[in-house]
Image (tube, coloured by chain):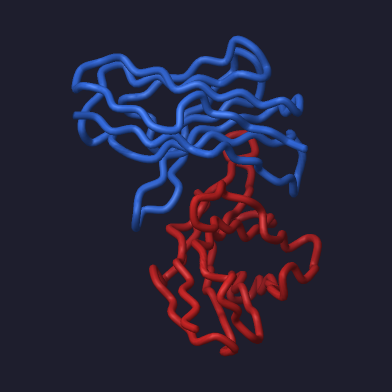
Chain colours: A red, B blue
Amino acid sequence: AQRVTQPEKLLSVFKGAPVELKCNYSYSGSPELFWYVQYSRQRLQLLLRHISRESIKGFTADLNKGETSFHLKKPFAQEEDSAMYYCALSGRSGGYQKVTFGTGTKLQVIP
Amino acid sequence: DVKVTQSSRYLVKRTGEKVFLECVQDMDHENMFWYRQDPGLGLRLIYFSYDVKMKEKGDIPEGYSVSREKKERFSLILESASTNQTSMYLCASSLARVNTEAFFGQGTRLTVV
């Protein structure tokens, strides 16, 4: 079974402060991990994926297989970062590729 | 530009009604998914389909069924709607390959009264 855990429902930070959204996973194989974001009144969209190892809107995420984590980080939060963030894992389940999402963390950036 | 379109943005139905939620994608994606999104519970997979007429149960299939008669269309059916099915429903599609992005529809807010 595959599982994604996001321990924080809400994370409030001040503008300019560092941000870290936590994500831990459980999966027996080699995981494919993603961060999705949903801004207010917009559809859910991909933010970044671990395979790309890129920075999007200043966000980065490193896969740590030893700690089974894929935390999302940004050094300086901006007001427009306020949104709902979901960590997701894509893995084989019953012969098919299945995507499992975490419960989400609401990021609130205080001006 | 990938488009995943859900037929309704808001729906209000009565308990016991049969409800159809429709989703269409225009990028020839093999995989299609139905999730429900609830505060504090995140996105939970109801059903997914990896090909026409093929379907697999997700994590919470009870009370739901699906239909995929054409590659671009994936329907979610509530056989007899109940109040605990009041939720936001999200449809998504993706290619059938590793590390592929899922594209989401705008969501359907269903209220069962």
Q: Nearer the viewer, residue B57 or A104?
A: A104
Residue B64's image quarter? top left
Picture mark count? 0
Q: Is residue A10 left or right of residue A38?
A: left
> At 46% across and 66% down in the image, what residue appears?
A105
> At 48% across and 57% down in the image, what residue appears?
A102
Residue B76's image quarter? top left
| Residue B25 higher or lower than B67, as above or below | below
Q: Farthest residue to the front: give it.
A: A111
Horizontal and vertical percent for residue B3? Answer: 68, 33
Horizontal and vertical percent for residue A80? Answer: 59, 70
Q: Is residue B11 left or right of residue B8?
A: left
Q: Nearer the viewer, residue B111 or A47?
A: B111
Q: Quadrant of the C terminus of chain B?
A: top left
Q: Farthest residue to the top: give it.
A: B69
> At 60% across and 18% down in the image, what residue appears?
B73
Horizontal and vertical percent for residue A31? Answer: 66, 56
| Residue B96 higher or lower than A17, as above or below | above
Horizontal and vertical percent for residue B47? Answer: 48, 30
> At 28% across and 36% down in the image, what residue appears?
B86
Q: Nearer the viewer, residue B4 or A79?
A: A79
Q: Quadrant of the N terminus of chain B?
A: top right
